[in-house]
């Protein structure tokens, strides 16, 4: 089995578990018995079901996270956001620096070498009459990286493949913790002398 196929299976398992927890918590479902192939079995301790679901959620989250790292899923999403931010910064330099100063710099001024760093972009402007220049964009680049998540989410499947399962897991955990906070508080207080 290749990494992508393994990732798809782990994502499916995590999302099914998350959605099960979300639906059970939102609808307030309670299990008293279970029907397995026509055989009815009574559940003696229904309070164990949420703990079993939580254990499954943690396990599938761990499996999904390792599979996601193998295919560099989140890295691909953030790379597309960086690429979008870079293009917007380049467009900003063209519109706001090169075009308005066409008389000053001449028609030969253009964006040459580019260095992309984690939190800023350096554009080398060449073709100036006297010398070449360097423009460093940091705040705008960081803002564009965050804003880039919207078009990347809308126009690609990277968000739903790699980021959405983490958000569903967070939602399921919050719902589980809200309902079981009293149990957790009582458990912790029973540990203290």
Image (cartoon, rainbow, N blue to C red):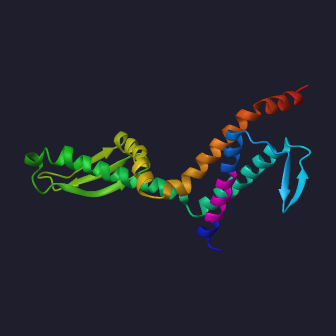
Tell me the quadrant of the picture where the C terminus can be found. top right
Relative image position of residue 113 (x, y in whole percent): 29, 58
Residue, x 35% and y 55% (percent of image)? 115
Q: Which residues are magenta?
A: 7-17
Residue furthest to the front: 38
Relative image position of residue 63 (x, y in whole percent): 69, 58
Residue furthest to the left: 103
Q: Nearer the viewer, residue 129 or 19?
A: 19
Relative image position of residue 34 (x, y in whole percent): 84, 52
Q: Main secondary structure of the magenta part?
A: helix
Q: Nearer the viewer, residue 40 or 119?
A: 40
Q: Nearer the viewer, residue 127 or 76?
A: 76
Residue, x 32% and y 44% (percent of image)? 137
* Residue 74 visible to an observer of this rendering: no
Residue furthest to the top: 193
Residue, x 65% and y 64% (percent of image)? 9
**For residue 159: magenta?**
no
Q: Nearer the viewer, residue 64 or 103?
A: 64
């Amino acid at each position: 089995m290749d990494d992508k196929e393994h990732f798809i299976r782990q994502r499916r398992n995590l999302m099914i578990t998350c959605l099960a927890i979300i639906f059970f918590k939102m609808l307030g479902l309670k299990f008293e018995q279970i029907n397995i192939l026509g055989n009815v079995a009574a559940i003696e301790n229904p309070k164990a079901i949420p703990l079993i679901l939580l254990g499954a959620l943690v396990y599938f989250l761990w499996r999904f996270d390792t599979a996601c790292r193998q295919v560099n899923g989140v890295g691909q999403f953030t790379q597309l956001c960086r690429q979008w931010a870079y293009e917007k910064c380049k467009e900003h330099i063209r519109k706001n620096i090169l075009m308005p100063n066409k008389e000053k710099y001449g028609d030969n001024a253009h964006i040459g070498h580019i260095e992309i760093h984690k939190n800023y972009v350096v554009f080398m402007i060449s073709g100036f009459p006297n010398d070449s220049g360097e423009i460093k964009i940091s705040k705008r680049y960081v803002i564009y990286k965050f804003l880039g998540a919207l078009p990347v989410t809308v126009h690609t499947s990277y968000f739903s493949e790699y980021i959405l399962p983490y958000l569903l897991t967070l939602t399921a955990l919050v719902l589980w913790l809200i309902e079981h906070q009293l149990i957790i508080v009582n458990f912790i207080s029973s540990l203290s002398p």
